[in-house]
Amino acid sequence: SFLTSLLFSLLLVLILPFILAFFFPQYIMIGTSTAILIAGTIFFASYYIIYSYYIGKQRPYHMILPVAGGTCLNVLLAYFFLTKGYGVEGVALASTFAHLGILLWIGYREHMKRVTIMSLLAMVLITLTAVLGYWGIVVLVLSFPLSMACKIITMEDLKVIKETLTASFYARQNPRRH
């Protein structure tokens, strides 16, 4: 679900400095670019669902313009950021902005306001978590009630989650015998 992906993305951004410092101290400098790419991944995952739908319907041409436009935007922004000295962070920003551009294009064309807003909210929350560092735990805790208030998560969603967890737990307690 979107909430699960959001919560794990926030958690990953929150613990990323610890993971890098403990396991990969030689790569500690990639923390910022990784956090930027995680935000871009939310945009990518949001529009890729629609993209896959059209592939499955054997109408991939419906997605050619947005994806080609996003690819061109990515190349142009990467070149711009590299020439301005932003390095890896600039390339990560270019990729994130390109995915955002594709999502906005597809979201507008397909009238998918809710998916677009959810993705933008996720971007804001991930950015806040990265900027706040250790205090990003506050964002992680507040993201659930905020998602409820913005109607990203509904009571029906919670009911489905509860039923799935209950069924999973019950299946483990009572395995089928063949």
Image (cartoon, rainbow, N blue to C red):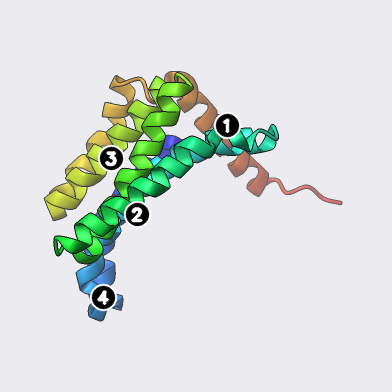
Q: Is residue 100 visible?
A: yes
Q: Which residue in the rendered view is the most extreme toward the bottom? A: 26
Give the alpha-carbon distance from disc 4 to disc 1, as whole Å: 40 Å
**Element on which disc 3 rests:** helix
Q: Residue at x 35, y 20 (%)?
A: 151
Give the alpha-carbon distance from disc 1 to disc 3, as whole Å: 26 Å
Which badge, 4 or 1, comes first in the chain's sequence? 4
**Splitting the image into 4 quarters, where does residue 171 fall?**
top right
Which badge, 3 or 4, comes first in the chain's sequence? 4
Q: Residue at x 18, y 62 (%)?
A: 83
Amino acid type at mark 2: Val
- Mark 1 = which residue? 62
Assess whether mark 1 and mark 2 are in contact (beta carbons under 8 angstroms).
no
Q: Is residue 38 visible?
A: no
- Mark 3 = which residue? 123
Numbered circle sitting on residue 80: none
Give the alpha-carbon distance from disc 3 to disc 2, as whole Å: 21 Å
Which badge, 4 or 2, comes first in the chain's sequence? 4
Q: x and y percent of residue 19 in the render?
A: 29, 68
**Element on which disc 4 rests:** helix
- Mark 2 = which residue? 75
In the rendered view, would you say 87 is above or below 133? below
Numbered circle sitting on residue 27: 4
Q: x and y percent of residue 22 in the render?
A: 26, 75
142 sits to left or right of 64: left
Q: Which of label 3 and label 2 is nearer to you?
A: 2
Assess whether mark 2 and mark 3 are in contact (beta carbons under 8 angstroms).
no
144 sits to left or right of 165: left
